[in-house]
Image: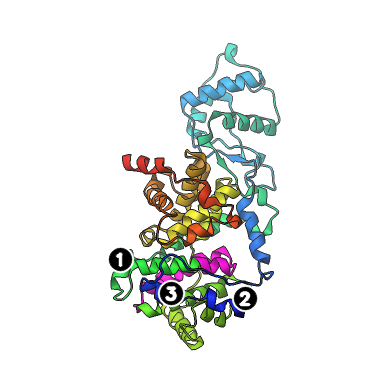
Amino acid sequence: MVNPDENNRNVVAKPITEILQGNETRSRKFGLEMKRQNRRALGVNNQNLVGAKAYPCVVNKRRGLSERQQGCEKKKLDSLHPLISRPQEETKKLKPSSIPSGNEFGDCIFIDDEEEENEATLDQPMPMSLEEPYIESDPMEEEVEMEDIIVDEGEEELVLDIDGYDANNSLAVVEYVEDLYEFYRKNERFSCVPLDYMEQQFDITDKMRAILIDWLIEVHDKFELMNETLFLTVNLIDRFLSKQAVVRKKLQLVGLVALLLACKYEEVSVPIVEDLVVISDKAYTRNDVLEMEKIMLNTLQFNMSLPTQYPFLKRFLKAAQSDKKLETLASFLIELALVDYEMIRYPPSLLAATAVYTAQCTIYGFSEWNTTCEFHSHYSEHQLLECCRRMVSLHQKAATDKLTGVHRKYSSSKFGYIATKYEAAHFLVSQSHKL
């Protein structure tokens, strides 16, 4: 349970209503000293899912090979081993029976030839002078050799099995992880809100929303809550504001109650209501919080379990074979997008994919969006460029903007000073402009 120090309450708390009136829009300090609890038993384990190494298995998704590719592969086969060098007409199609048990894909690459072409060529007799003696070989030896050849042929054709390495990790749920994310993709549209929902609000604006979320990101960091909690909090705020008109003096209360509900859904140890009253400088009472909680739950029809950007971000970072720098920079970029009202036009999966793609370009200076990333995200590089241009723009002005809560958070040693280490990927803006 998080209990703020009584001596620091006057320093920590500041009603956001004053900020909304324009008194203090930039500097909001939180001196709240939290007692760290062992609340991350599940959260620490889940971090393994992001940083897991890919299983060295490659699955080729091509349905057929062109004549030029077949010729190249035949030359490579000839140079590797004379025993596999035989006319293409005698090339045997790999059968499912040769797949080793215990792994869904095995340690091989499958090449699907067209059956009609094989039957047509095998029916034609060949001159004896062109035939070479057929020697039965181990199917696994052929598969391994063919895997090496395709790996050398071109990286853009590869799709890595990113879950094979976690076969023994029960938290990775390898057996149905693809089904889970297919379900997320089908249901993420219910997480989206209309882009013009702020027009129905008569007393608040998109700038006030940005101030609220920027403040909540700092509160979330000071309370040391899980990452899932932040994204669900913002999701609840947008969904509620799209259905319910709110007066300005109640906007901070909406944010606090959304944080409380997200904590109840995601956290092991939930902050008490009195903690939320304190950080609002006692602008609201306990009864105000509980009453708004009832209103929000009824407005949302108690529907809390909708996919946010975070599960997609974890999956796409795993597909990108991310390290700590890429993971932290992508988190920085996607939190900048949480503050910006214009970014709600994009679905959660697209925002997550764009954050990973933009982080790759920012660190390496060029695109590393390969076939594996495209396969698991369902987005091509071209589909990401529009959202990417907006995200780069947010990165450019993160340090100088009026709302610098996210930039200050990621400029600390806790996050490796990632916000100050890398400049925005300017070349992506010009590239998107040309396209």
Cα distance in 3D space between marks 2 and 1: 37 Å
Q: Which residue is mark 2?
A: 2
- The quadrant of the picture occupied by the C terminus is top left
Can residue 174 be seen in this snapshot? no
Q: How is the image coloured?
A: rainbow
Residue sitting farthest toward the top: 129
Q: SS class of the residue under badge 3? A: helix
**Residue at point 68% right, 52% down?**
167
Q: Nearer the viewer, mark 2 or mark 1?
A: 2
- Residue 148 location, quadrant: top right
Establish if 110 lies above or below 230.
Answer: above
- Of callouts 3 and 1, the N-terminal one: 3
Q: Given the image, on which type of amino acid does mark 3 rest?
A: Ile
Which residue is more in the foreground, 274 or 373? 274
The amino acid marked with disc number 2 is Val
Marks 3/1 in contact by CB < 8 Å: the verdict is no
Residue at mark 3 to residue at mark 1: CA–CA distance: 24 Å
The residue indicated by pointer 3 is: 16
